[in-house]
Image: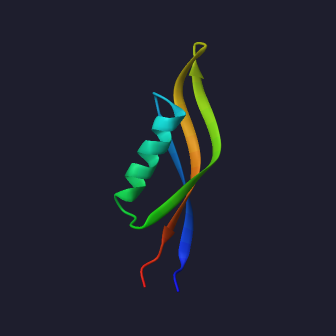
Amino acid sequence: MSVAKVIEIIASSNKSFEDAMVQGVAKASETLQGITGAWVQDQSVKVKDGKVTEYRVVMKLTFVLKD
């Protein structure tokens, strides 16, 4: 039997939503083992002087707990 846990993280990038997702999973992988999936719950942008300056994603990561 395996047990999975779901956590929520927020990641940002000045390039794109996709880059924010990739960076978030990569950073989480530094301390979590066994990440099996990610679900983007929300996306938002930071705007300054009429221009998008930052892309943000709220993600739920699933990882399997060790036996």
Q: Position of residue 41 (x, y in %)?
A: 65, 49
Name which residue lies at 49% across and 67% down. 63
Residue 34 higher or lower than 46, as above or below: below
Residue 67 higher or lower than 20, as above or below: below
Residue 12 seen: no
Asked which colour scheme the image uses, the reply is rainbow
* Residue at far top of view: 49
* Residue at far left of view: 30
Count of numbered tags: 0
Specify the quadrant of the image occupied by residue 28.
bottom left
Name which residue lies at 46% across and 27% down. 15
Q: Position of residue 36 (x, y in %)?
A: 49, 63
From the image, which quarter does the C terminus lie in?
Answer: bottom left
Residue 17 higher or lower than 63, as above or below: above
Residue 16 seen: yes
Name which residue lies at 65% across and 44% down. 42
| Left or right, 37 with reference to 31 | right
Q: Position of residue 49 (x, y in %)?
A: 58, 13
Name which residue lies at 36% across and 62% down. 31
Q: Position of residue 50 (x, y in %)?
A: 61, 13
Is 28 or 46 nearer to us in this picture?
A: 28
